[in-house]
Amino acid sequence: MSPVPVEPPVTETAEPFWEATRARRLLLQWCTDCERPVFYPREVCPVCHGSALEWRPASGLGTVYAVTVEHHPQHPAMAEIAPYPVALVDLHEGVRMLTRIVGSADPEVGMAVSVTWEALTDGRNLPLFEPAKEI
Ligand code: ZN
C-alpha cells in the first residue's frame, strides 16, 4: 500500500483547479487581457496586473526544465517513497510547475512528460508527471 500523500490545501483562488482534478482534468488560469497563462492560481495577472482571469483546459504535456532527486524529505509520508525525482516542468502552455516525476527513477532535463494523477483522500487528484508515451 502506498503512503498517504501530502494533501495540498485548497485556497479559494485555487478551488476551480482542485475541483477539476476530481475528474483528472488539468486547468490553467489565463489572463484574457494579455493572453498569457498564469500559474500558480492568483487573483491578479502577474504580468499586466489585470484581474480578468479565466480557467482553461491544459494539454498536460510538458518538458523537464530541471530535476533533482529528493533523498530526505521532511514529511514522514514522503520519506516512505524516497528517493524520488522532483522536477520543474515547463508546460507547453508556457508555465512552470514544481512537481514529482513518476515512472522514471532518473528523468533527464529536456525529457517530454505528460500529466498523470495520484488520488488524494478527499476525491481530489494530485497532478504528477511521467515520461510522455510515444504516439
Ligand atoms: Zn495579463
Image (cartoon, rainbow, N blue to C red):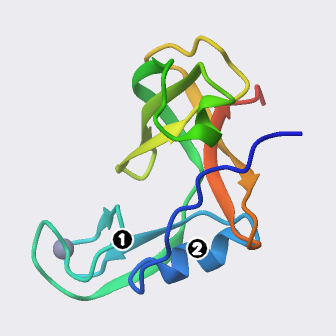
Q: Quadrant of residue 31?
A: bottom left
- Quadrant position of residue 66: top left
- Label 2 CA crowd tier, 10 Å (few <14, some 14–19, many 20+): many
> Seen from this angle, which residue lies furthest front?
76
- Report the side of 92 relative to 103 (left or right): left
Above or below, 3 relative to 86: below
Q: Which mark is residue 18?
A: 2
Closer to us: 18 or 114 = 18
Name the quadrant where ligand 1 sits. bottom left
**Quarter of the image containing the N terminus?**
top right
Label 1 sits on residue: 41
Residue 110 is at least partly visible in this image: no
User: Can the viewer see residue 78?
Assistant: yes
User: Hey, which residue is sitting farthest left in the picture?
Assistant: 48
**Image quadrant containing the C terminus:** top right
> Going by the image, does 79 lie left or right of 108?
right
The x, y position of residue 6, in whole percent, is 59, 52
Please tell me whether mark 2 sits on a helix, a strand or a loop: helix
Q: Specify the amino acid type for callout 2.
A: Trp
The span from disc 2 to disc 1 (Cα, nearest Å) is: 11 Å
Q: Residues within 10 Å of mark 1 (few under 14, many from 20)?
A: many
Look at label 1 and name its amino acid: Pro
